[in-house]
Amino acid sequence: MKSKTILFGLCGLTLTLLAVFSMMALGRRNQPIAQRNCALQIFEVVGQVRSLDLLNKTVRISHQEIPDYMPAMTMPFAVKDAKLLRGVSVDDSVKFQLTVSKDDSWISRLEKATPGATKEPVRTAPASSLQDRETERAQIGEKILDFGLVDQDGRNFHLSDFRGKAVVLTFIYTRCPIPNYCPLMSKNFAALQQRLSKEFTDKYQLLSISMDPEFDRPEILKDYAGRYGANGKDWWFATGNAEQISFVAGLMGLYYAKENGLISHDLRTALISPDGRLVHLWKSNVWTPYEVDRLVRETLTGADQQGKVPRR
């Protein structure tokens, strides 16, 4: 009799636990996605379209403050579904949903809003200045003018110090809040460092240049470099005074500007040949370490990734 009582008790406990787990699962299914996935944040934003890049599925928007995430500023945002940009024009007022994960961010919904929905205009560079920077930048095949900066150890250096090496440079700033902009550039460079170190030791140089020289002092950059595993030999982080940074940014056609404590900016990543000429310029975040590795190999060896087709 005692055994039966224990058995019934165990059965009752099992049924109770099953009921509890079922209720928990049901409640979880009914939770909003953002609550179920703590790494996923969703924001409702209002702004005005400043420019469109349909090829790279990017739209630059001057937006209002995004509470608990980003102050009012002008930034390019990725759109995974190109259909969202149909019928959208420069100067349109828009409402959009910004989805942010640990490693990515994108506009998941976008619609036109009532003109004037933005409470106050956000300062942004005139379209003409963006066009001017693109026109005045170095062109493919041209020699890059020499420039001087300061590395993460406080040492002065010049681009010409890397002659004989393939140089890959990009622009970042350590406080950048968009995961698929500056943080992605640094993650890609970390992967590129691993790839190139296996095959081209002492024949390449990675250079991450800060757009925020007032904050990104050498000691700040050194700490940031450590977070991404930069070896300090083939991958340097650089800063300088405002004029120096502006000069290098101009060479690459990079737009950047301070806005409400952060920096509104484009993306530019460049490959420079061992003799100092511009080989390729990526204007977005869609490049991959594999793609850059392949072009570095072509630049250094004069052959494609299979080593069979000589360059002309």
Image (cartoon, grey):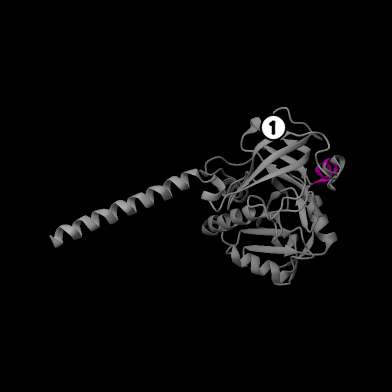
Region in magenta: 131-137
Amino acid marked by disc 1:
Leu
Which corner quadrant holds the C terminus? top right
Work out which residue is located at the far left of the displayed protein and give it.
Answer: 1
Q: Is residue 250 left or right of residue 221?
A: right
Work out which residue is located at the far top of the displayed protein and give it.
Answer: 87
* Residue 208 in view, yes or no: yes
* Residue 163 in view, yes or no: no
Residue 19: percent from left, percent from top: 35, 49
Residue 42: percent from left, percent from top: 62, 46
Within 10 Å of disc 1 (Cα), the crowding (few <14, some 14-19, many 20+) is some
Residue under label 1, please give it.
85
Q: Is residue 71 left or right of residue 233?
A: right
- Depth check, front residue: 135 or 17: 17
- Depth check, front residue: 288 or 259: 259
Give the number of marks.
Answer: 1
Q: Is residue 102 left or right of residue 236?
A: left
Residue 223: percent from left, percent from top: 65, 69
